[in-house]
Image (tube, rainbow, N blue to C red):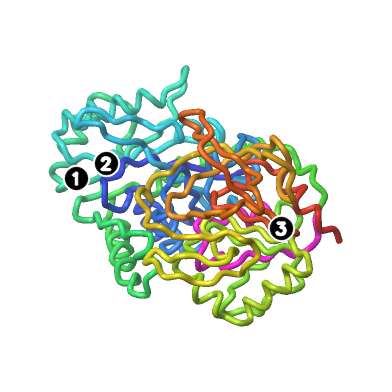
Amino acid sequence: MNLPRLIIADEATPGMVAPGVVLAYAMKRAGVKVKVFTCARTEAEMRLLRLLMEEPVVSLDTYACGSIKNLKTLFQKTADPEALNVVVVPLGSRTDEEFIQVQPEALDLAKSLSCGIVVSLTGAGSPALTTNVTSAVLETFGTGNENYVLGVVFTSVKSGRDYQLLEQDYGRKTAIISLGYIPKEIERPMPSLLDMYNPAAGTRIMQIKSAAIQLASTIHQVEWQILDAFGHLKQDWTSPQESRYPAKNFKAAIVGDKRLSLEGCNSRELFRYLGCEVIDYDPWEDRFPLDAEVVYFPHSVAALYTDALLLHPPFFQGMKQAFAANKLIFANGASAPFFGQYYLTTGGQKHEGLKFFPFHGSYPSPTKRDETHKIEIRGTGDSIFSKNDEKMRGYLLDYVHISNPGNPIPPVLSYRDIRKNVEIGSSGWSKGYCFVTDLHVELWSNIDVVNRWLSLRKR
């Protein structure tokens, strides 16, 4: 099997669109057939990529997938053998002008997928300084006799003359090829996540597209064909073991996936992997899928739509019927609050919920939405979703909160901070065949749990 693949690890300028995002879209406009994946990107960057590429984006990293085997399975199921499969990954953060703290994701991913890396680095400083910083970064990607970096693209370069001087200095000191540069004039401000759900967001997205098209159309600004060729260097692909899970052969409806999800299309692909027929259910456009055995609410921008959704009678009545019929219902992350008695919006307005659970929910203003707080999730008791001591991975969200007054239904999950190795809270409530959590649970991190949960509905 041949799956052309390449990693772009970029150094981003705070507040600006990441270079890897620009390169992925510009490569497409330059005539290269591209399938984009993300790794360790923010929710806003994933949303922007989806809008730019106009197709679902898969989030691909060893943390979220739980194991290399799961990661390779997800990649193999979603990669396009007729395209260049590009994974955009953050390179790291610059602690000062002379040093970049490189994150491990790009190298871990390169080893797992057996492919090369193109590094994108800021070239705004003097040629000598940029060359020294670049050389130090490249050394971090060398393991044994192999250096996974195939080429470098410089960003934030003020002019073609500046790039010529940089290329001369860089070329004298390293054998890794320079593939061109992104001019500083191409840079655009990064829209906030909420901005990209605003009807007026189209203008800002078009500005980013126009800049990338300008980059793609300038001859030899970036060597697009060499980038494409790099993706074909590693032709052999070692397939993971075939699925041992019996096909479920029933329908799983994902609510608002195309419009609202912040998960990428990972959950959809997992349900397909486990043998479900997946329905993308748009609650404002489609009839409620009463023939589905599973109704899944992905982690999403729920704060923007829950009030309108609960005032939409076809959806509200459909959910009541699905709950009464013991359909498998799962609400992940920010989708959870409106399953309670009521919830508070970010502005403090109170709205009634579905009232399946006695808890109260709220959407406080986010403090660190661009940061991810990795957690390990553990079952503290048996529920319809997880069993005692089963572990999954996920993220703690500071802009979603559930309070459980009187604890009439105790939580069945605990979670600990990965970095500090201490338990920091609890979550997860089940009632009948409905399960909700205000954590963003990565379903790919433990496929056995999801498979057993789906197996509760047999056809």
Query: For the residue marked with disc 3, what is the amino acid?
Result: Lys
Q: Position of residue 418 (x, y in %)?
A: 50, 32
Q: CA distance from mark 2 to mark 1?
A: 7 Å
Q: Position of residue 240 (x, y in %)?
A: 69, 37
Q: Which residue is mark 2?
A: 154
Q: Residue furthest top?
A: 144
Residue 260 painted magenta: yes
Magenta residues span 248-270
Q: Residue at x 76, y 54 (%)?
A: 454
Q: Residue at x 26, y 57 (%)?
A: 189
Q: Position of residue 174 (x, y in %)?
A: 29, 25
Mark 2 closeness class: few <14, some 14–19, many ≥20 residues within 10 Å: many
Q: Secondary structure at mark 2?
A: strand
| Residue 263, numbered circle | none
Q: CA distance from mark 3 to mark 1?
A: 57 Å
Q: Which residue is mark 3?
A: 431
Q: Which residue is mark 1?
A: 157
Q: Residue at x 48, y 52 (%)?
A: 36
Q: Position of residue 432 (x, y in %)?
A: 75, 59
Query: For the residue marked with disc 1, what is the amino acid?
Result: Val
Residue 175 painted magenta: no
Q: Nearer the viewer, mark 3 or mark 2?
A: 3
Query: For the residue marked with disc 2, what is the amino acid?
Result: Phe
Q: Tell me whether circle 2 and circle 1 mark residues in contact (CB < 8 Å).
A: yes
| Residue 263 visible here | no
Q: CA distance from mark 3 to mark 2?
A: 54 Å
